Amino acid sequence: MVKLETLLALERAEIVAKYEQGHQSGSPADPDPWDDSDLSCYKVTYRWEQPGLSTQGLSIHGLSTHKARQRAQDIRRATKWVKMLRNWSKYWGSRKMRRRVYKGIPPQVRGQAWSLLLDLEKVKVENQGKYQRMKEQARLYSRDIKYIDMDVSRTFQNNIMFQERYGIKQQALFNVLTAYSVYNTEVGYCHGMNQIVAILLMFLNEEDAFWALAQLMDNKRHAMHVGTLLGASQASSFWSSRNFRDCRPIMIRFWRGLFPS
């Protein structure tokens, strides 16, 4: 009789091979529709597809009065953020920085802001090569690969970034989640992490998204782990539910600044 471990290893290898092969022309693009999260604010990619320290492309020409006012406000806010990000050491920890985070970070600078707020460059320097090692270990040993694969196929199905089965963004999402499942064995993979990481991947590259997840989950400053073995979906609900009253106000506002509605 074939041992269970052998069967699991074969299943794991089969799933990994599909992601390594990537999207194939003619393959089904749409997973089962019954489990789509359908978060409307992330149904399509943002109009600024390549976020950067620039307000280029923000024009009010040809817009209605209301939309023109909104766009003008977007330009003002983005310009302020560009200035602040270029002088980060001056603004870090200041009341002005906190106030702007609470208001919400403009999409076109969101990746750079998250990177600085989560101190990603420092973390990457301290852990050079570790993400690649975690990816390789996950392909051999992660017990969560089957569940991760199922959730990847259901993640933001209406967002152009994640529509292709085994496409570039689904590959990145799979890589980050499987790597984290062996990086933090206490937590492993929890249903709901896929949505958090997918949002991170809209603005960060693959390795940065991994370390952003690690910082959010493991760093005491952010405490998404909430001190217990809450799943990521439970943690997400925790931050957005009536339990807000039990949280530190600064964490509530920081969370809303990361993922503004």
Image (cartoon, rainbow, N blue to C red):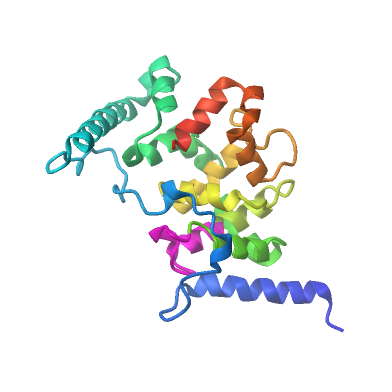
- Considering every residue shown, the one lying at the far top of the view is 95
Check if residue 160 falls in the magenta segment: yes
Question: Is 144 placed above or below 211 here?
Answer: below
Q: Position of residue 214 (x, y in %)?
A: 59, 42
Q: Does residue 219 appear in the picture of this structure? A: no
Question: Is 234 placed above or below 118 here?
Answer: below
Q: Quadrant of the N terminus?
A: bottom right
Residue 229 appears in which quarter of the rendering? top right
The front one of 222 and 237 is: 237
Residue 64 appears in which quarter of the rendering? top left
Question: Is 101 placed above or below 166 here?
Answer: above
Q: Position of residue 258 (x, y in %)?
A: 47, 35
Q: Position of residue 252 (x, y in %)?
A: 55, 27
Check if residue 5 falls in the magenta segment: no
The front one of 261 and 6 is: 261
Q: Which residues are magenta?
A: 157-175
Q: Quadrant of the C terminus?
A: top left
Residue at position x 54%, y 22% in the image: 250
Q: Relative to 41, is 247 on the left or the right?
A: right
Residue at position x 23%, y 33% in the image: 75
- Considering every residue shown, the one lying at the far right of the view is 1
The front one of 178 and 67 is: 67
Residue at position x 41%, y 79% in the image: 25
Q: Relative to 225, is 115 on the left or the right?
A: left
